[in-house]
Every structure is written in structure tokens, then in C-alpha cells.
């Protein structure tokens, strides 16, 4: 019964939220607020405003986390209790053994190992080659540069489903199919990273590089000693997004990885689906376990978005 | 500025060459992989679009047949219109919300790390779970959304994902909800590049919060916004997996989008030639929008 | 050979495509005797034991041959297989999940002709004909499912409704569903009279198999109308969960029938093994159930009830070398026969080969309902293909799938939707 009532409140929040978050925050929140030590009433208003802000944020967070909440509770259900009418937000009995069973019934550790390996390798290479190429696009003027850049961006627009067979044939011919290298090769050189880094380099004042050039620093030196340190928020973003996308990629591993010892989490979890049946409870268990590492990385990484290592410090 | 350009002009030839070498040396490590692994198959795709390839064996050249067929293909028209419908709403809504969230969460408030993580959660939550929960919320008879609507006096609440008329708005809401955190991250990173002094200066000048947002934040974010808009536009025009799990294009063809149609024609019906032709249309659509954005962006920069 | 047609624009493009055509024909022929290892593609091996069962059973017959089962994704099996075949990295033998994709593999020259193997089988092996194209046979069926009506004897008793007689038309079925609903409501149960899963086959499969003169390729789908009207009536009168609720709640038929949310349900024969396993594990409730023949179009077919389901067969990759080919053909001469059928029946699979011994083996399973009607249903149901092999089948089924969601969600009335589907088939479906 307790489960039922808490569920109702969550549902209602979920229903109302969609539209609300759009309108509230924008105008007043524009500048980074920071405490404003002025007169008394003003400070009290800020406190009240802040309290209201927290409430709004908490409600919004609940709405946003609702499916995750359902995912967690479903991971503690019997399989036949996952999809029911009416919705069961909290199971009557918690089936903790799902979390034991998933390790017994599958090679979860192998999947995690592969996924981690791929995510780390792809992220590292993507950031390195992407930011390096971005410097070329952002800071070195040469003929054909813009056309080449447009070509990079344009390929993002080609749906992968349409060219994955020719690509697969190519990689098979050089013996890369059914190896982790295939995924690393595919994901590393995406145009996304180049584009993202170039946009951020564009915001760094040219004078900084000019000054360094006068001091006799080479372009490579400028990239390493000036641009990289200044683009920490951008790199953090790219690391995070690349990591998440590689971690959650399904179609790539589906096409390229056949041997069970190469499977990633997303691929492995699909073994709980057979032709006419699916073990949704274990799928949700696996999904929860799969999200946790990303959540941790995000929690740790997000501080790079406030440290403000950006241009302002260098200007003075 | 003018004198600088003049000096540059004199040494143009030699400098251009040296710059080309330097530029390419930066780009090459990435370009090798990109050219080989992406560009080559994409070129292959452009060829396949002029054949009737079925994934096996030969690819008979059929000239413009596939493109002629597109003109009279009703399902293609439906998919194209649905894709534009989705993008027309999904892009501005996601953009607004992502920017709003980023600005709101770009503070040192206590607990902001939690809220940022929460905002990003829809993007990392299993898409199966997202589809399951949203579909339950939308359920016409037993779903909470319609229960609320009925209780506040709406007599005939929409059928959401089970109605041909409302399925697209329903999908758009989920799309916005899922991706706003993703683009928020990009905006957050962009906000860090805006020098703090600019805000202080504006405050000294007595600018209101809204004025500071209009005159400092927005211009400062322009490179990020350009990036977000381009990626978001392409992403919206290519929307695929979300629709697949939420409605599978239905009811009827009411949420059938181009990417899904491409997959259907290719991997279900083995008409890879035709699927490639549709991909080219989708590609050209994206490129057109992107080039327009490039031009606008450049005009503003100048 | 095939090169001349492919070389055209761009060196690499041509190379890639030519390789697609010529790839796969690898190794030189190995000596014919000695141990041979063949690879066989299957899916979800941990929950789908039939592939390994066949491999093990054959290994006992011929210890020289080892069949190595390779695991593919259940939902994207054909996507993976297509890429593998295109690149020449596919296994020696691969399962034909349904007849829809069989056509593509066959017409794309990705299946070897098995006429000689097929000639070793007689009428006891159902479904061979479905794999016959022109003068060849391109896969050997080992499994033939069929749709039945599963019913919950306890709920029938609770509702006070007589159990199926084995002589039901669809009108009888619909009336029973309504009676059940009334009886269950009166008894204070919140179960439904029937459950109809959201798949298009639950309506269209029966309509196509049973209606005299129905033709999937014809573009005339008015034969589906009575079937849809009945389904809509049952959902409107609350005798089964509405389509909208079933899709939005992602209902699974295992939960609906297994946890007694519905008193009866049309479903394929594969569910027998699942239900047994789930009752064993406690995932499904303990209750007494049986299977009845699919309701019929009219009373003329009560003796041999007509139902539907595609066969599941195994095809041979034409790229295998001669030594492997001989071993593979021997294996294929085994999978559709009685020995394989017995092994399959013992794990609850409905084999393509039927005989009294196979029926005995199937009903020897712990927990299978052994009443006469269930036996009759298993032994006498005549399954017609859901996807008759034709160039247009996949396209037609996609169009009809969209029509199904449009009708069942009651977005539009039945007639115009079926008519539109017909005209779309005429303009969109390939004819050759």
C-alpha cells in the first residue's frame, strides 16, 4: 500500500513536468548569481528564491529520474511482474537475487571488461586526434580548409544504417570484423569530436597564440601548452559524451562483434531476449548495473564545468 | 586590421604553402581514419543509390530509377513530412530547455552536481526502460497523464502513442525530455568560455538579469550554439531508435520517420539501392540546413 | 565473373562490391574423411536450446562431425546474417527464422540447393514444400510451430463456462470470450475473458490461413475484415485488454496467460515449453490448462483444424567447400527426420517431423496437459505458412503491419484501412 501511494505522487509529477521546466528558470537565472551582499530584505528574498528554486529543481529531478526509478524497481521484480496493468511502481516483494543471478547466468564481467576497454580506448583516441585536428581547422588557415571541414560535418548527416554494409565488407576484408579493433576504428575518428573541439578553440582569443608565436613557440607547442589547458571544459564534455556513447552503443557491436567473449554490455543484455520471450527483470538489472559507472564518472567529471579554467584567467 | 592584411598579402604564396603543410599535419591523423572508415563507405553509398543492390552479389546499375521512384512513393512522403514535423518541434524545444537548464545549473549552488547528473540521466537510462515508462504514462485508459486530464475535466483526453493524431507530439515530448540533458552539457561547457569580467562589467553598468543574458551570455555562447544547433538538427532529422522503441512508426504510419524507412527498405526488404537513395535525400536535407546555418553563423561573425 | 557489372564509379567502391559478390569462397577442399567441424548460426543460446540439441544429437550419430553453434542476436538475427553473408563471413549452416527472409537469401543466391537431401524425406516432414523454389529445395525444416488456443481450465470453471470442444468457429470463440468475461466479473475475478497479443499475426495470420481464396500478394485484404470486426468487438466490450493498453503497458503474453490475467489466448506452440518452464520456476502461477485447436473459418475443417505458422529450417551457405558440404548435407538429412524430432520433442519443441512416437515424446514432458483435446490439437493441426514465399511478401507484411496498428488502435475504421493497404501494395510491392 505504501508503494502505491508514493507511486501516485511520482506519476503526477511526471505528468506535469514535461512543460513546466521550460518556462520557469530562464530569465532570472541568466547570470551566475552568486551571493549579493547588499541590504537585508534583498538577502531574505534571495534565500526564499533559492528555496523555491530547490523545490522546483527537486520536482524536476524526480520527473526526470522516474524511468530510472522504474528501472531500478523492475530489476527487483519477478520477470512476469515487470509489465502489468496497472503499473506496479514498487514490487510487493523485492527479488534481490536478480543481482546474483545475472552474474551466474551471464558473463557480465566479461561484458563490462570489453565495454570498459572500448570506452577508454575510443575516448582517449577520439580526444587526442579530434582536438589535434580541430586545431588545424580552427587556427591554421589554408586553402580548402573550410570545404574539408564541411565534408567532415556533412558525413554526420549520412545515416549509418545505409552504409554499414559496405563498411563492414571493407573491415572484414582486412580481418577486423569480430575484433574489438573494429569498434575502436569506427568510433575513434568521428567528425563529432573534431567539430566540438573546433567550436571551442574558436572562442579562445587569437592574441594568446599570436603572443606565443612571437615567443617562438611552434604550432604544436601552442596546441599542447595553450589550447589544451584552456579547453578543459570542452575536453571534459567530449570525454563524457564519447564515453557514454561508446558505452551504450548497440548497433556497432551488434554488427561487428560475434564471439561471446567480445560482447559489450548492451549486446550481452540482449541475450536475455529470445525469439518469443524476454527476461525483462534481468535486462533491467543489467541496465541498472550498466548505468552506475557512467553516473559515477559524470558526478566526478561535472566539476570541470564550473572551475572556469577558461579564457578569463589568462587575459589579465 | 588592414595593415596586417596587407603584410600578409605580400608573403602569401610561401606562407600559404607552409600553412597548408602545418594544417594538414594536424588534421591528418584523424583524417586518415575518417577518410578510410567513413568517407569511403559513404562514397560507396552514393554509388549504391544508383543500383538495385540487395546486399548480396552484384549491383546492377539502374541510373536514376531509385530517385524517380521516390517521387511517387507515398510512404516516403509520409516519412519525410513526419521527420520535418518531428524536427520542427523537437529542435527549438530541446534547444530552449537545454540552454535554460545549463544557465540554471551553471552555479555553485549546493547540490548542483546532483541536479546536473539528474538532468543527464534520461540520456543514459536504458531506452527500453524509457519507452516502457513513457508508454505507461501515456496509456489512454490506465495512464496517469490521462487520469490527471480527466480529473481536471478534460472529457476526451488524447490517445497519445495509440492515436494517429497524437502519437507524434507524444514522441516529441519524450525526445525533448531525453536529449535536453545531453545538450545541456554542451552549453555548460560553452558557458565556461565566457569571461566572468563581462558579467561584472554589465552589472556595473546596471544591466538587468535579462539584459545580461541577451547581451553577454547569448553572444558568448555563439560558437557553442552553432555546434549544438547543427548537431541537434542532424540528430533530429535522423531520429531513429527512440521512435522504434516508443511507437515503431505507428499507429499506422503516423510516426514513421526517414531513418526508420531507410532501415525498413534496407534490412527488412533488402532494397539497399533504394534505401541508399532515401539516405541521400536525408543527407542533402541535413547538408542544406547545415550550410544555411554556416552562412548565418559566418555573417554574424563578420 | 560477376565483376564486369560491378566495376563502375570509384575504385574502392567497385572493389568492395565485387568482394561482396565473390567473397566467402575460401579454403581449398580438405580431405573428405576425418573429423569435420561445421558452424551453425542460432540465437539466444542460453534460452533457445534447440540448436545445441540438434548438434549434440547429430554428434552422437556421427562422432566425426562436430557442429559448433554460433550465437546471434534474437531480434536482429537477419541483420547480422545479412552483413555476414555480404562480407563472406557467415557460418556454414544457418537457421531460417521465418519464410520472409528465406526468400531474400534464396533469391540472393545465399542458399545452396538441397534437392538431394530433400528427396530423402517423405510427407511426415511438414513444411518442406515451403522451401521449394522452382526445381530446388533450399532449406530443411526441423521445426513446425502452429497456433493454438491456450485455455485456463480453472478460470473456465470459475466463470462457469464450458471448456472448448475442439469444434469452434471464430464466432463461438468470441461468444465464449464474452461469456467468460461475464462469468468472471460475476465471480469477482479481475481476469479477462481472452487476451489477444499485439502482433499482426494474431488477426492476419488466421485470416490468411483459413479464408478460402485469400492471397497475400493479391492486394485484396477484405478477407481480414470479419476477423478484425470480431477483435474490435471483444476489446470494445471489455472481454480482452484493449490494443492501446496492451501496447502502452508493453504487456507480455507470458504474463497475461501465465499469471491468470486471461482465461484463454491464441498463441503459437512455442509457448508450451515456456509455460512449463515458468510454472516450474514459479514465474507463472500453478493452474490447470490445455490447448485447443485454433477456431475455424467454418465447420468444414473441424477434423483437420487449419492454423498457421512458418516452419523453421536450416539452410546451407553455398560458399562451403566440398568436404564440408558432404558432412553438412548428412546433417541436414538428419534434422528433419524422426531421431532429431524425438530429441526436439523432449525439450518441448514442435518438430517438423510428425509421428505417433514424436507425439508420445512431446506428451511425455513433465507438466504437459495430456487430455484428448490437447493431443488432438498437437497431432492434427495443419499449419499453413504465415509468409508464403514470394517476392512481395516482406513489403506486403510491412504495409499490413501498419494497417494492423491503425485498425486496432481504432485510429480509422477497418474497411478504408484495408483498402488503402491494398492500393499501397499495388503501388509499392515489387512484382518480380
Image (cartoon, rainbow, N blue to C red):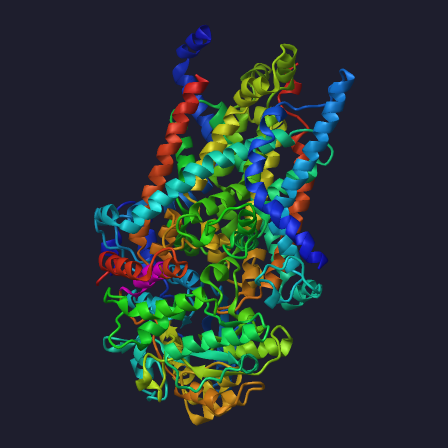
Q: Position of residue B194 (x, y in %)?
A: 60, 22
Q: Position of residue B137 (x, y in %)?
A: 55, 52
On screen, residue C121 versus residue B33, left or right, reads: left
Q: How many marks?
A: 0
On screen, residue A290 versus residue B23, left or right, reads: right
In the figure, B16 relative to B174: above or below?
above
Question: In the depicted view, which residue is nearer to us: B259 or B19?
Answer: B259
Q: Position of residue A45 (x, y in %)?
A: 73, 23
Q: Is residue C14 visible?
A: no
Question: In the depicted view, which residue is nearer to us: A218 or A93?
Answer: A93
> Who's the residue at 43% across and 46% down the image?
B168
Within the image, what quadrant is residue A44 found in?
top right
In the figure, A295 relative to C103: above or below?
above
Question: In the depicted view, which residue is nearer to us: C253 or A144?
Answer: C253
On screen, residue C157 versus residue C328, left or right, reads: right
Q: Main secondary structure of the magenta part?
A: helix
Q: Is residue C362 visible?
A: yes
Q: Position of residue C16 (x, y in %)?
A: 34, 52
Residue extending furthest toward the top: B3
Question: In the depicted view, which residue is nearer to us: B186 or B243?
Answer: B243
Q: Which residues are magenta?
A: C392-403
In the figure, B278 relative to C223: above or below?
above
Residue extending furthest toward the bottom: C356
Queried whether the magenta region covers residue C395, the answer comes back as yes
The quadrant of the rendering that contains the C terminus of chain B is: top left
Queried whether the magenta region covers residue A129, the answer comes back as no
On screen, residue B283 versus residue A233, left or right, reads: left
> Who's the residue at 50% across and 23% down the image?
A139
> Who's the residue at 40% across and 53% down the image?
B249
Amino acid at each position: 500500500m505504501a508503494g502505491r501511494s508514493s507511486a501516485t505522487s511520482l506519476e503526477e509529477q511526471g505528468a506535469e513536468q514535461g512543460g513546466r521546466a521550460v518556462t520557469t528558470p530562464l530569465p532570472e537565472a541568466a547570470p551566475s548569481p552568486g551571493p549579493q551582499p547588499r541590504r537585508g530584505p534583498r538577502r531574505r528574498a534571495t534565500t526564499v528564491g533559492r528555496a523555491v528554486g530547490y523545490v522546483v529543481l527537486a520536482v524536476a529531478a524526480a520527473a526526470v529520474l522516474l524511468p530510472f526509478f522504474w528501472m531500478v524497481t523492475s530489476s527487483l521484480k519477478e520477470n512476469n511482474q515487470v509489465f502489468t496493468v496497472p503499473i506496479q511502481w514498487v514490487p510487493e516483494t523485492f527479488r534481490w537475487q536478480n543481482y546474483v543471478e545475472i552474474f551466474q547466468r551471464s558473463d557480465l564481467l566479461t561484458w563490462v571488461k570489453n565495454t570498459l576497454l572500448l570506452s577508454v580506448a575510443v575516448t582517449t583516441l577520439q580526444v587526442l586526434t579530434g582536438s589535434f585536428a580541430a586545431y588545424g581547422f580552427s587556427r591554421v588557415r589554408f586553402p580548402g580548409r573550410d570545404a574539408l571541414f564541411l565534408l567532415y560535418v556533412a558525413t554526420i548527416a549520412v545515416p549509418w544504417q545505409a552504409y554499414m554494409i559496405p563498411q563492414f565488407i571493407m573491415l572484414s576484408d582486412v580481418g577486423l570484423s569480430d575484433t574489438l579493433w573494429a569498434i575502436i576504428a569506427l568510433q575513434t575518428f568521428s567528425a563529432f569530436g573534431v567539430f566540438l573541439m573546433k567550436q571551442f578553440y574558436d572562442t579562445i582569443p587569437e592574441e594568446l597564440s599570436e603572443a606565443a608565436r612571437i615567443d617562438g613557440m611552434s604550432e604544436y607547442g601552442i596546441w599542447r601548452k595553450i589550447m589544451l589547458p584552456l579547453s578543459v571544459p570542452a575536453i571534459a564534455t567530449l570525454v563524457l559524451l564519447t564515453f557514454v556513447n561508446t558505452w551504450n552503443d548497440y548497433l556497432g557491436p551488434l554488427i561487428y562483434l560475434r564471439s561471446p567473449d567480445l560482447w559489450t554490455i548492451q549486446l550481452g543484455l540482449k541475450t536475455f531476449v529470445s525469439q518469443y520471450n524476454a527476461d525483462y527483470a534481468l535486462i533491467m538489472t543489467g541496465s541498472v548495473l550498466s548505468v552506475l559507472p557512467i553516473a559515477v564518472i559524470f558526478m566526478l567529471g561535472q566539476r570541470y564545468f564550473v572551475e572556469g579554467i577558461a579564457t578569463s584567467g589568462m587575459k589579465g | 586590421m588592414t595593415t596586417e592584411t596587407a603584410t600578409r598579402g605580400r608573403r602569401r604564396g610561401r606562407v600559404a604553402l607552409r600553412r597548408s603543410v602545418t594544417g594538414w599535419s594536424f588534421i591528418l591523423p584523424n583524417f586518415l581514419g575518417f577518410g578510410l572508415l567513413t568517407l569511403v563507405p559513404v562514397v560507396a553509398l552514393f554509388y549504391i543509390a544508383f543500383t538495385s543492390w540487395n546486399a548480396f552479389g552484384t549491383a546492377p546499375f539502374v541510373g536514376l530509377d531509385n530517385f524517380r521512384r521516390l517521387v511517387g512513393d507515398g510512404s516516403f512522403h509520409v516519412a519525410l513530412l513526419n521527420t520535418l514535423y518531428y524536427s520542427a518541434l523537437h529542435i527549438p524545444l530541446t534547444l530552449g530547455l537545454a540552454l535554460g537548464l545549463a544557465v540554471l545549473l551553471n552555479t555553485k549552488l549546493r547540490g548542483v552536481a546532483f541536479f546536473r547528473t539528474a538532468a543527464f540521466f534520461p540520456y543514459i537510462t536504458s531506452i527500453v526502460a524509457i519507452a516502457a515508462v513513457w508508454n505507461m504514462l501515456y496509456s489512454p485508459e490506465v495512464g496517469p497523464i490521462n487520469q490527471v486530464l480527466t480529473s481536471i475535466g478534460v472529457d476526451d483526453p488524447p490517445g497519445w502513442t495509440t492515436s494517429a493524431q497524437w502519437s507524434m507530439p507524444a514522441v516529441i515530448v519524450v525526445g525533448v525530455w531525453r536529449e535536453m540533458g545531453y545538450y545541456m552539457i554542451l552549453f555548460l561547457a560553452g558557458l565556461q568560455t565566457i569571461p566572468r569580467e563581462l558579467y561584472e562589467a554589465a552589472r556595473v553598468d546596471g544591466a538587468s538579469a535579462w539584459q545580461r543574458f541577451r547581451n553577454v551570455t547569448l553572444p558568448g555562447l555563439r560558437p557553442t550554439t552553432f555546434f549544438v544547433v547543427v548537431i541537434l538538427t542532424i540528430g533530429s532529422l535522423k531520429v531513429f531508435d527512440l521512435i522504434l522503441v516508443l511507437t515503431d512508426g505507428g499507429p499506422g504510419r503516423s510516426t514513421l520517420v526517414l531513418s526508420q524507412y531507410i532501415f525498413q527498405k534496407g534490412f527488412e526488404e533488402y532494397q539497399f539501392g533504394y534505401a541508399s537513395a532515401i539516405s541521400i535525400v536525408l543527407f542533402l536535407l541535413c547538408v542544406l540546413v547545415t550550410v544555411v546555418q554556416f552562412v548565418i553563423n559566418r555573417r554574424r561573425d563578420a | 565473373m560477376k565483376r564486369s557489372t560491378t566495376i563502375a564509379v570509384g575504385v574502392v567502391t567497385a572493389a568492395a562490391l565485387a568482394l561482396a559478390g565473390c567473397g566467402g569462397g575460401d579454403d581449398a577442399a580438405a580431405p573428405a574423411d576425418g573429423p569435420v567441424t561445421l558452424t551453425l548460426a542460432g540465437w539466444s543460446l542460453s534460452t533457445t536450446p534447440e540448436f545445441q540439441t540438434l548438434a549434440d544429437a547429430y554428434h552422437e550419430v556421427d562422432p566425426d562431425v562436430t557442429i559448433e553453434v554460433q550465437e546471434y542476436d534474437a531480434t536482429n538475427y537477419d541483420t547480422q546474417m545479412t552483413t555476414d553473408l555480404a562480407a563472406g563471413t557467415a557460418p556454414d549452416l544457418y537457421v531460417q527464422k521465418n519464410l520472409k527472409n528465406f526468400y531474400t537469401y534464396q533469391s540472393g543466391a545465399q542458399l545452396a540447393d538441397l534437392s538431394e537431401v530433400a528427396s530423402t524425406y517423405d510427407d511426415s516432414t511438414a513444411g518442406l514444400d515451403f522451401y521449394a523454389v522452382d526445381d530446388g529445395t533450399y532449406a530443411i525444416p526441423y521445426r513446425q510451430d502452429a497456433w493454438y488456443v491456450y485455455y485456463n481450465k480453472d478460470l473456465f470453471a470459475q466463470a462457469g463456462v464450458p471448456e472448448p470442444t475442439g469444434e469452434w468457429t471464430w464466432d463461438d470463440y468470441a461468444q465464449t470470450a464474452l461469456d467468460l468475461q461475464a462469468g468472471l466479473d460475476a465471480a469477482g475475478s479481475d481476469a479477462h475473458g481472452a487476451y489477444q497479443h499485439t502482433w499482426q499475426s494474431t488477426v492476419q495470420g488466421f485470416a490468411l490461413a483459413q479464408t478460402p481464396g485469400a492471397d497475400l500478394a493479391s492486394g485484396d485484404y477484405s478477407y481480414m475484415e470479419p476477423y478484425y470486426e470480431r477483435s474490435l468487438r471483444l476489446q470494445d466490450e471489455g472481454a480482452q485488454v484493449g490494443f492501446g493498453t496492451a501496447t502502452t503497458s508493453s504487456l507480455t503474453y507470458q504474463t497475461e496467460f501465465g499469471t491468470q490475467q486471461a482465461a484463454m489466448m491464441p498463441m503459437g506452440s512455442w509457448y508450451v515449453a515456456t509455460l512449463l518452464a515458468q510454472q516450474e520456476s514459479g514465474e507463472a502461477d500453478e493452474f490447470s490448462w490445455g490447448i485447443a485447436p485454433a477456431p475455424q473459418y467454418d465447420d468444414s475443417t473441424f477434423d483437420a483444424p487449419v492454423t498457421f505458422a512458418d516452419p523453421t529450417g536450416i539452410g546451407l551457405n553455398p560458399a562451403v567447400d566440398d568436404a564440408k558440404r558432404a558432412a553438412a548435407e548428412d546433417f541436414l538429412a538428419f534434422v528433419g527426420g524422426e531421431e532429431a524430432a524425438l530429441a526436439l520433442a523432449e525439450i518441448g519443441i514442435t518438430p517438423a517431423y510428425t509421428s505417433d512416437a514424436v507425439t508420445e515424446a512431446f506428451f511425455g514432458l513433465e507438466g504437459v496437459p495430456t487430455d484428448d483435446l490437447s493431443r488432438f490439437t498437437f497431432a492434427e493441426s495443419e499449419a499453413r505458412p504465415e509468409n508464403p514465399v514470394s517476392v512481395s511478401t516482406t513489403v506486403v507484411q510491412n504495409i499490413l503491419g501498419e494497417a494492423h496498428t491503425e485498425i486496432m488502435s481504432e485510429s480509422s475504421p477497418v474497411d478504408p484501412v484495408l483498402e488503402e493497404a491494398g492500393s499501397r501494395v499495388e503501388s509499392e510491392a515489387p512484382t518480380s
